[in-house]
Amino acid sequence: MTQYTNSGSKDTRSGFGEAMLELGRTNPEVVVLCADLTPSMKLEAFSKEFPERFIQTGIAEANMICIAAGLTIGGKIPFTGTFANFSTGRVYDQIRQSVAYSDKNVKICASHAGITLGEDGATHQNLEDLGMMKMLPNMTVINPCDFNQTRAATLAACNHKGPVYLRFGRPKVPNFTPADQKFEIGKALILSKGMDVSIFATGHLVWKALEACRMLEEQGISSEVINIHTIKPLDEEAVLASVGKTRCAVTCEEHQMNGGLGDSIAQLLARKCPVPVEMVAVKDSFGESGTPEELMKKFGLDTADVVNAVKAVLARK
Amino acid sequence: MFAPAKKIDNLIAVIDFNGKQIDGPVDTVMPLGNLRAKFEAFGWEVTDMDGNNIPEVLNVLNKVKSITGQGKPNMIIMHTHMGYGVDFMMDNHEWHGVPPTNEQAARALSQLPETLGDY
Protein backbone atom coordinates (compact mmCIF):
# COMPACT_ATOMS: atom_id res chain seq x y z
CA MET A 1 0.00 0.00 0.00
CA THR A 2 0.99 3.64 -0.30
CA GLN A 3 2.66 4.81 2.90
CA TYR A 4 1.50 7.94 4.73
CA THR A 5 3.34 9.70 7.52
CA ASN A 6 1.91 11.87 10.24
CA SER A 7 3.88 15.12 10.00
CA GLY A 8 2.71 16.09 13.51
CA SER A 9 -0.83 15.91 14.89
CA LYS A 10 -2.91 19.07 14.64
CA ASP A 11 -6.57 19.97 15.02
CA THR A 12 -8.57 20.44 11.83
CA ARG A 13 -10.19 23.61 13.21
CA SER A 14 -6.75 25.24 13.23
CA GLY A 15 -6.49 24.48 9.51
CA PHE A 16 -9.74 26.38 9.10
CA GLY A 17 -8.47 29.33 11.20
CA GLU A 18 -5.24 29.52 9.21
CA ALA A 19 -7.11 29.50 5.89
CA MET A 20 -9.49 32.23 7.09
CA LEU A 21 -6.55 34.49 7.91
CA GLU A 22 -5.14 33.87 4.44
CA LEU A 23 -8.52 34.56 2.83
CA GLY A 24 -8.82 37.78 4.85
CA ARG A 25 -5.53 38.92 3.37
CA THR A 26 -6.26 37.89 -0.21
CA ASN A 27 -10.00 38.42 -0.69
CA PRO A 28 -11.58 41.69 0.47
CA GLU A 29 -15.10 40.26 0.04
CA VAL A 30 -14.57 37.65 2.77
CA VAL A 31 -16.50 38.39 5.98
CA VAL A 32 -16.53 36.23 9.12
CA LEU A 33 -19.46 35.92 11.51
CA CYS A 34 -19.11 34.17 14.85
CA ALA A 35 -21.61 33.33 17.60
CA ASP A 36 -19.55 33.71 20.79
CA LEU A 37 -16.94 31.05 19.99
CA THR A 38 -14.05 33.06 18.58
CA PRO A 39 -11.11 31.25 20.25
CA SER A 40 -12.72 27.78 19.89
CA MET A 41 -13.19 28.38 16.15
CA LYS A 42 -9.57 29.60 15.85
CA LEU A 43 -10.83 32.94 14.54
CA GLU A 44 -8.93 35.19 16.95
CA ALA A 45 -6.23 36.06 14.42
CA PHE A 46 -8.82 37.01 11.77
CA SER A 47 -10.86 39.05 14.25
CA LYS A 48 -7.79 41.03 15.31
CA GLU A 49 -6.40 41.67 11.83
CA PHE A 50 -9.76 42.41 10.18
CA PRO A 51 -12.07 43.82 12.88
CA GLU A 52 -14.14 45.62 10.24
CA ARG A 53 -14.86 42.27 8.53
CA PHE A 54 -15.52 40.29 11.69
CA ILE A 55 -19.08 40.30 13.05
CA GLN A 56 -19.65 39.05 16.59
CA THR A 57 -23.33 38.09 16.68
CA GLY A 58 -23.43 36.79 20.25
CA ILE A 59 -25.23 33.55 21.04
CA ALA A 60 -27.79 34.13 18.30
CA GLU A 61 -27.06 31.59 15.59
CA ALA A 62 -30.33 32.02 13.69
CA ASN A 63 -29.61 35.72 13.43
CA MET A 64 -26.06 34.94 12.29
CA ILE A 65 -27.25 32.74 9.41
CA CYS A 66 -29.77 35.35 8.26
CA ILE A 67 -27.23 38.20 8.41
CA ALA A 68 -24.84 36.03 6.38
CA ALA A 69 -27.52 35.37 3.76
CA GLY A 70 -28.19 39.10 3.51
CA LEU A 71 -24.49 39.96 3.15
CA THR A 72 -24.23 37.82 0.00
CA ILE A 73 -26.66 40.11 -1.82
CA GLY A 74 -24.05 42.86 -1.87
CA GLY A 75 -21.38 40.42 -3.08
CA LYS A 76 -19.76 39.59 0.24
CA ILE A 77 -18.59 36.03 0.92
CA PRO A 78 -19.71 35.33 4.49
CA PHE A 79 -18.28 32.47 6.56
CA THR A 80 -20.27 31.63 9.68
CA GLY A 81 -18.46 29.98 12.56
CA THR A 82 -19.84 27.94 15.42
CA PHE A 83 -19.96 24.29 16.53
CA ALA A 84 -21.60 21.68 14.28
CA ASN A 85 -24.41 21.35 16.78
CA PHE A 86 -25.33 25.03 16.60
CA SER A 87 -24.53 25.26 12.87
CA THR A 88 -27.21 22.76 11.83
CA GLY A 89 -30.13 21.63 14.00
CA ARG A 90 -30.44 24.90 15.85
CA VAL A 91 -30.68 26.91 12.61
CA TYR A 92 -32.11 24.41 10.13
CA ASP A 93 -35.05 26.58 9.16
CA GLN A 94 -32.86 29.63 8.52
CA ILE A 95 -30.42 27.55 6.46
CA ARG A 96 -33.21 25.90 4.48
CA GLN A 97 -35.13 29.07 3.67
CA SER A 98 -32.52 31.84 3.57
CA VAL A 99 -29.42 29.96 2.39
CA ALA A 100 -30.26 26.73 0.52
CA TYR A 101 -33.58 27.60 -1.11
CA SER A 102 -32.32 31.12 -1.84
CA ASP A 103 -29.05 29.64 -3.15
CA LYS A 104 -26.96 32.18 -1.25
CA ASN A 105 -23.18 32.12 -1.23
CA VAL A 106 -22.87 31.39 2.51
CA LYS A 107 -20.15 29.13 3.92
CA ILE A 108 -21.39 27.41 7.06
CA CYS A 109 -18.26 26.37 8.94
CA ALA A 110 -18.81 23.87 11.73
CA SER A 111 -16.23 22.76 14.25
CA HIS A 112 -16.43 20.26 17.14
CA ALA A 113 -18.39 17.79 14.99
CA GLY A 114 -18.84 14.19 16.07
CA ILE A 115 -17.92 12.31 19.23
CA THR A 116 -14.27 13.43 19.17
CA LEU A 117 -15.54 16.65 20.70
CA GLY A 118 -14.93 14.49 23.74
CA GLU A 119 -15.53 15.61 27.30
CA ASP A 120 -18.33 18.11 26.58
CA GLY A 121 -20.61 15.13 26.01
CA ALA A 122 -23.73 14.14 24.10
CA THR A 123 -25.49 17.52 24.06
CA HIS A 124 -22.69 19.00 21.96
CA GLN A 125 -21.62 15.94 19.94
CA ASN A 126 -23.51 16.35 16.70
CA LEU A 127 -23.69 13.11 14.71
CA GLU A 128 -26.57 14.06 12.41
CA ASP A 129 -25.20 17.15 10.67
CA LEU A 130 -24.04 15.53 7.43
CA GLY A 131 -27.47 13.99 6.93
CA MET A 132 -29.34 17.21 7.63
CA MET A 133 -27.11 19.21 5.33
CA LYS A 134 -26.85 16.76 2.43
CA MET A 135 -30.63 16.58 2.16
CA LEU A 136 -30.86 20.27 1.30
CA PRO A 137 -30.89 21.04 -2.44
CA ASN A 138 -28.09 23.44 -3.55
CA MET A 139 -25.96 22.55 -0.51
CA THR A 140 -22.39 21.29 -0.95
CA VAL A 141 -21.17 19.22 2.02
CA ILE A 142 -17.45 18.86 2.80
CA ASN A 143 -15.79 16.86 5.57
CA PRO A 144 -11.96 17.02 5.31
CA CYS A 145 -9.68 14.55 7.09
CA ASP A 146 -6.79 16.50 8.60
CA PHE A 147 -5.30 19.95 9.21
CA ASN A 148 -3.80 20.42 5.74
CA GLN A 149 -6.94 19.24 3.98
CA THR A 150 -9.22 21.43 6.10
CA ARG A 151 -7.06 24.43 5.22
CA ALA A 152 -7.25 23.55 1.50
CA ALA A 153 -11.00 22.85 1.69
CA THR A 154 -11.66 26.24 3.30
CA LEU A 155 -9.82 28.00 0.47
CA ALA A 156 -11.75 25.93 -2.10
CA ALA A 157 -15.09 26.68 -0.41
CA CYS A 158 -14.39 30.38 -0.86
CA ASN A 159 -13.88 29.95 -4.60
CA HIS A 160 -17.01 27.81 -4.99
CA LYS A 161 -20.15 29.80 -5.73
CA GLY A 162 -23.10 28.60 -3.65
CA PRO A 163 -23.92 27.36 -0.14
CA VAL A 164 -21.31 25.14 1.50
CA TYR A 165 -21.38 23.19 4.75
CA LEU A 166 -17.79 22.64 5.92
CA ARG A 167 -17.36 20.23 8.81
CA PHE A 168 -14.29 19.78 10.99
CA GLY A 169 -13.33 18.93 14.55
CA ARG A 170 -11.76 19.72 17.86
CA PRO A 171 -8.99 17.19 18.67
CA LYS A 172 -5.46 16.98 17.40
CA VAL A 173 -5.32 14.22 14.78
CA PRO A 174 -2.60 12.95 12.43
CA ASN A 175 -1.75 15.45 9.69
CA PHE A 176 -0.71 13.41 6.66
CA THR A 177 -2.02 14.99 3.45
CA PRO A 178 0.25 17.37 1.50
CA ALA A 179 0.47 20.98 2.73
CA ASP A 180 0.32 22.28 -0.85
CA GLN A 181 -2.59 20.10 -2.01
CA LYS A 182 -5.18 21.41 -4.44
CA PHE A 183 -8.65 20.71 -3.11
CA GLU A 184 -11.18 19.79 -5.75
CA ILE A 185 -14.75 19.81 -4.41
CA GLY A 186 -16.57 16.60 -5.37
CA LYS A 187 -13.44 14.71 -6.36
CA ALA A 188 -12.69 11.62 -4.27
CA LEU A 189 -9.04 10.81 -3.58
CA ILE A 190 -7.69 7.30 -3.93
CA LEU A 191 -5.13 7.10 -1.12
CA SER A 192 -4.11 3.50 -1.63
CA LYS A 193 -4.94 1.10 -4.44
CA GLY A 194 -6.22 -2.40 -3.72
CA MET A 195 -8.17 -5.30 -5.19
CA ASP A 196 -10.23 -7.07 -2.49
CA VAL A 197 -12.35 -4.37 -0.87
CA SER A 198 -13.09 -0.65 -1.27
CA ILE A 199 -12.92 1.37 1.96
CA PHE A 200 -14.65 4.73 1.64
CA ALA A 201 -13.79 6.98 4.58
CA THR A 202 -14.43 10.59 5.50
CA GLY A 203 -13.09 13.01 8.12
CA HIS A 204 -11.23 11.61 11.11
CA LEU A 205 -11.91 8.05 9.92
CA VAL A 206 -9.61 8.39 6.90
CA TRP A 207 -6.50 7.88 9.04
CA LYS A 208 -8.15 4.92 10.78
CA ALA A 209 -8.92 3.43 7.35
CA LEU A 210 -5.26 3.77 6.36
CA GLU A 211 -4.19 2.06 9.60
CA ALA A 212 -6.69 -0.72 8.91
CA CYS A 213 -5.39 -1.06 5.36
CA ARG A 214 -1.88 -1.61 6.73
CA MET A 215 -3.08 -4.28 9.18
CA LEU A 216 -5.13 -6.01 6.49
CA GLU A 217 -2.18 -6.05 4.12
CA GLU A 218 -0.18 -7.99 6.73
CA GLN A 219 -3.01 -10.53 6.68
CA GLY A 220 -2.90 -10.76 2.88
CA ILE A 221 -5.97 -8.62 2.21
CA SER A 222 -5.61 -5.87 -0.39
CA SER A 223 -7.85 -2.90 0.32
CA GLU A 224 -8.41 0.27 -1.67
CA VAL A 225 -8.73 3.34 0.58
CA ILE A 226 -10.66 6.28 -0.82
CA ASN A 227 -11.02 9.61 0.94
CA ILE A 228 -14.51 10.97 0.35
CA HIS A 229 -13.92 14.52 1.56
CA THR A 230 -16.98 15.76 -0.31
CA ILE A 231 -20.14 14.05 0.92
CA LYS A 232 -22.19 15.97 -1.61
CA PRO A 233 -21.91 16.00 -4.53
CA LEU A 234 -20.70 12.41 -4.14
CA ASP A 235 -18.02 11.36 -6.62
CA GLU A 236 -20.18 8.57 -8.07
CA GLU A 237 -17.73 7.80 -10.84
CA ALA A 238 -14.89 7.12 -8.39
CA VAL A 239 -17.08 4.97 -6.12
CA LEU A 240 -18.42 2.88 -9.01
CA ALA A 241 -14.98 2.47 -10.58
CA SER A 242 -13.51 1.13 -7.33
CA VAL A 243 -16.43 -1.14 -6.46
CA GLY A 244 -16.60 -2.38 -10.04
CA LYS A 245 -13.15 -3.82 -9.35
CA THR A 246 -13.43 -4.98 -5.71
CA ARG A 247 -17.15 -5.94 -5.69
CA CYS A 248 -17.66 -4.94 -2.01
CA ALA A 249 -17.46 -1.83 0.12
CA VAL A 250 -16.90 -0.63 3.68
CA THR A 251 -17.84 2.93 4.64
CA CYS A 252 -16.30 4.77 7.62
CA GLU A 253 -17.48 7.98 9.27
CA GLU A 254 -17.85 9.75 12.59
CA HIS A 255 -21.59 10.20 12.10
CA GLN A 256 -24.86 8.35 12.48
CA MET A 257 -25.24 5.43 10.11
CA ASN A 258 -28.61 6.93 9.22
CA GLY A 259 -28.06 9.83 6.86
CA GLY A 260 -24.29 9.75 6.58
CA LEU A 261 -21.69 8.79 3.99
CA GLY A 262 -22.54 5.08 4.18
CA ASP A 263 -26.12 5.91 3.45
CA SER A 264 -25.16 7.89 0.32
CA ILE A 265 -22.86 5.14 -0.95
CA ALA A 266 -25.33 2.34 -0.24
CA GLN A 267 -28.01 4.26 -2.11
CA LEU A 268 -25.74 4.72 -5.12
CA LEU A 269 -24.66 1.07 -5.12
CA ALA A 270 -28.23 -0.20 -4.74
CA ARG A 271 -29.13 1.75 -7.88
CA LYS A 272 -26.04 1.16 -10.01
CA CYS A 273 -23.97 -1.75 -8.69
CA PRO A 274 -25.49 -3.88 -5.91
CA VAL A 275 -22.69 -5.44 -3.83
CA PRO A 276 -22.26 -6.21 -0.09
CA VAL A 277 -21.67 -3.12 2.04
CA GLU A 278 -20.67 -2.82 5.71
CA MET A 279 -20.72 0.47 7.61
CA VAL A 280 -18.48 1.77 10.36
CA ALA A 281 -20.62 4.51 11.91
CA VAL A 282 -22.55 5.40 15.05
CA LYS A 283 -25.53 3.11 15.30
CA ASP A 284 -28.55 5.19 16.27
CA SER A 285 -27.27 6.43 19.60
CA PHE A 286 -26.20 9.71 21.18
CA GLY A 287 -22.62 10.21 22.31
CA GLU A 288 -21.33 10.67 25.85
CA SER A 289 -18.54 12.33 27.76
CA GLY A 290 -15.03 10.85 27.48
CA THR A 291 -11.70 11.33 25.75
CA PRO A 292 -11.85 11.14 21.94
CA GLU A 293 -9.83 7.90 21.99
CA GLU A 294 -12.12 6.25 24.55
CA LEU A 295 -15.21 7.27 22.61
CA MET A 296 -13.96 6.14 19.21
CA LYS A 297 -13.37 2.73 20.73
CA LYS A 298 -16.67 2.58 22.62
CA PHE A 299 -18.77 3.69 19.64
CA GLY A 300 -17.09 1.26 17.24
CA LEU A 301 -15.16 3.79 15.15
CA ASP A 302 -11.63 2.52 15.75
CA THR A 303 -9.10 0.88 13.45
CA ALA A 304 -10.10 -2.57 14.71
CA ASP A 305 -13.71 -1.84 13.78
CA VAL A 306 -12.67 -1.04 10.21
CA VAL A 307 -10.70 -4.29 10.05
CA ASN A 308 -13.68 -6.26 11.38
CA ALA A 309 -16.04 -4.60 8.90
CA VAL A 310 -13.72 -5.56 6.03
CA LYS A 311 -13.68 -9.18 7.18
CA ALA A 312 -17.46 -9.17 7.50
CA VAL A 313 -17.96 -7.78 4.01
CA LEU A 314 -15.44 -10.18 2.48
CA ALA A 315 -17.36 -13.09 4.04
CA ARG A 316 -20.49 -11.88 2.23
CA LYS A 317 -18.80 -11.40 -1.14
CA MET B 1 -44.62 36.09 26.42
CA PHE B 2 -46.51 32.84 26.98
CA ALA B 3 -46.36 32.96 30.79
CA PRO B 4 -47.77 36.49 31.22
CA ALA B 5 -50.36 35.90 28.47
CA LYS B 6 -51.64 32.79 30.25
CA LYS B 7 -51.29 34.43 33.69
CA ILE B 8 -49.03 31.66 34.97
CA ASP B 9 -48.57 33.25 38.36
CA ASN B 10 -47.29 30.26 40.30
CA LEU B 11 -44.07 30.42 38.32
CA ILE B 12 -40.76 31.75 39.67
CA ALA B 13 -37.91 31.87 37.15
CA VAL B 14 -34.33 32.73 38.07
CA ILE B 15 -31.63 34.12 35.79
CA ASP B 16 -28.07 33.51 36.94
CA PHE B 17 -26.75 36.81 35.63
CA ASN B 18 -22.96 36.83 35.87
CA GLY B 19 -22.36 39.09 32.86
CA LYS B 20 -19.85 36.75 31.25
CA GLN B 21 -19.85 34.50 28.17
CA ILE B 22 -17.16 32.50 26.35
CA ASP B 23 -15.79 35.35 24.23
CA GLY B 24 -15.78 37.88 27.08
CA PRO B 25 -18.04 40.22 29.07
CA VAL B 26 -21.66 40.18 27.85
CA ASP B 27 -21.48 43.97 27.53
CA THR B 28 -18.68 43.58 24.98
CA VAL B 29 -19.94 40.53 23.05
CA MET B 30 -23.63 41.44 22.74
CA PRO B 31 -25.00 43.80 25.41
CA LEU B 32 -28.37 42.81 26.87
CA GLY B 33 -29.36 46.38 27.74
CA ASN B 34 -31.80 46.80 30.59
CA LEU B 35 -32.78 43.22 31.35
CA ARG B 36 -35.20 44.21 34.09
CA ALA B 37 -37.08 46.62 31.80
CA LYS B 38 -37.22 43.99 29.07
CA PHE B 39 -38.90 41.41 31.33
CA GLU B 40 -41.21 44.05 32.74
CA ALA B 41 -42.20 45.01 29.19
CA PHE B 42 -43.14 41.37 28.63
CA GLY B 43 -45.36 41.45 31.71
CA TRP B 44 -43.21 39.82 34.39
CA GLU B 45 -42.84 40.88 38.00
CA VAL B 46 -39.09 41.34 38.40
CA THR B 47 -36.95 41.19 41.55
CA ASP B 48 -33.19 41.73 41.69
CA MET B 49 -30.96 39.97 44.20
CA ASP B 50 -27.32 39.32 45.08
CA GLY B 51 -26.86 35.66 44.22
CA ASN B 52 -23.58 35.28 46.08
CA ASN B 53 -25.13 36.34 49.38
CA ILE B 54 -26.85 33.19 50.67
CA PRO B 55 -28.95 34.85 53.45
CA GLU B 56 -30.24 37.32 50.82
CA VAL B 57 -31.02 34.47 48.41
CA LEU B 58 -33.12 32.70 51.06
CA ASN B 59 -34.82 35.93 52.02
CA VAL B 60 -35.67 36.94 48.43
CA LEU B 61 -36.88 33.46 47.46
CA ASN B 62 -39.33 33.51 50.37
CA LYS B 63 -40.41 37.06 49.58
CA VAL B 64 -41.08 36.26 45.90
CA LYS B 65 -42.92 33.09 46.90
CA SER B 66 -45.21 35.26 49.03
CA ILE B 67 -46.17 37.44 46.04
CA THR B 68 -47.13 34.60 43.68
CA GLY B 69 -50.77 34.17 42.70
CA GLN B 70 -51.25 37.80 41.72
CA GLY B 71 -51.74 37.36 37.98
CA LYS B 72 -48.10 37.67 36.85
CA PRO B 73 -45.14 35.27 36.52
CA ASN B 74 -42.12 36.20 38.67
CA MET B 75 -38.56 36.68 37.48
CA ILE B 76 -35.58 36.94 39.81
CA ILE B 77 -32.47 38.46 38.27
CA MET B 78 -29.77 36.90 40.39
CA HIS B 79 -26.62 39.03 40.10
CA THR B 80 -23.61 36.78 40.61
CA HIS B 81 -19.84 36.68 40.20
CA MET B 82 -18.62 33.71 38.23
CA GLY B 83 -16.00 31.75 40.22
CA TYR B 84 -16.98 33.67 43.36
CA GLY B 85 -14.40 33.63 46.13
CA VAL B 86 -11.62 32.00 44.10
CA ASP B 87 -8.98 34.62 43.38
CA PHE B 88 -7.78 33.17 40.07
CA MET B 89 -11.27 32.36 38.73
CA MET B 90 -13.54 35.14 39.94
CA ASP B 91 -15.07 37.25 37.14
CA ASN B 92 -12.77 35.66 34.57
CA HIS B 93 -14.69 34.47 31.49
CA GLU B 94 -11.81 32.23 30.44
CA TRP B 95 -13.05 29.68 33.00
CA HIS B 96 -16.34 29.25 31.12
CA GLY B 97 -15.43 25.91 29.56
CA VAL B 98 -12.14 24.95 31.20
CA PRO B 99 -12.07 22.21 33.85
CA PRO B 100 -9.55 22.91 36.61
CA THR B 101 -6.62 20.56 37.02
CA ASN B 102 -6.51 18.61 40.28
CA GLU B 103 -4.01 21.12 41.62
CA GLN B 104 -6.16 24.11 40.60
CA ALA B 105 -9.26 22.47 42.07
CA ALA B 106 -7.45 21.97 45.40
CA ARG B 107 -6.31 25.60 45.39
CA ALA B 108 -9.83 26.80 44.57
CA LEU B 109 -11.55 24.69 47.23
CA SER B 110 -9.02 25.74 49.87
CA GLN B 111 -10.21 29.34 49.40
CA LEU B 112 -13.89 28.53 50.02
CA PRO B 113 -14.65 27.84 53.69
CA GLU B 114 -18.06 26.38 52.82
CA THR B 115 -16.55 23.65 50.63
CA LEU B 116 -13.77 22.61 52.98
CA GLY B 117 -14.37 19.06 54.10
CA ASP B 118 -17.00 18.42 51.46
CA TYR B 119 -14.64 16.60 49.10
Image: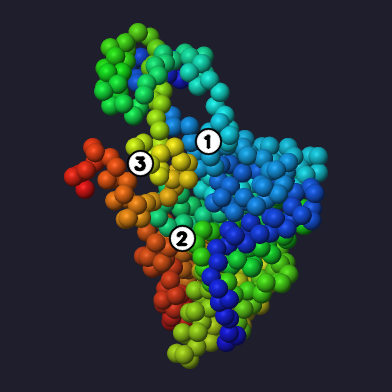
Question: How dense is the environment of label 2, judged by Cα within 10 Å: few (below 14), some, or many (20 and up)?
Answer: many
Q: Classify mark 1: helix, strand or loop.
A: strand
Q: In the image, what residue occupies the spot 48% across and 36% down?
A: B20
Dot 2 falls on which chain? A
Question: How dense is the environment of label 1, judged by Cα within 10 Å: few (below 14), some, or many (20 and up)?
Answer: some
Q: In the image, what residue occupies the spot 27% across and 45% down?
A: B110
Circle 1 residue: B25
The foreground one among A101 and A161 is: A161
Q: Distance between the residues labelled 2 and 3?
A: 31 Å
B119 to the left or right of A87: left
The image quarter in which residue A95 lies? top right
Q: In the image, what residue occupies the spot 50% across and 88% down?
A: A217
Reply above or below: A184 against A7: above
Q: Classify mark 2: helix, strand or loop.
A: helix
Give coordinates of residue A9: x percent, y percent. 53, 70
Q: Distance between the residues labelled 1 and 3?
A: 18 Å
> As shown in the figure, which amino acid type bears the numbered disc 1?
Pro
Q: Is residue A257 visible in this depiction of the protein?
A: no
B37 to the left or right of A184: left
The foreground one among A234 and A206 is: A206
What label does residue A166 carry, if any?
none
> As shown in the figure, which amino acid type bears the numbered disc 2?
Thr
What label does residue B86 carry, if any?
3
Dot 1 falls on which chain? B
Task: Give the mark toward the camera: 2 or 3.
Answer: 3
Dot 3 falls on which chain? B
Residues tagged by mark 2 and mark 3 found on one chain of the structure: no
Q: Classify mark 3: helix, strand or loop.
A: loop
Residue pushed farthest left? B117
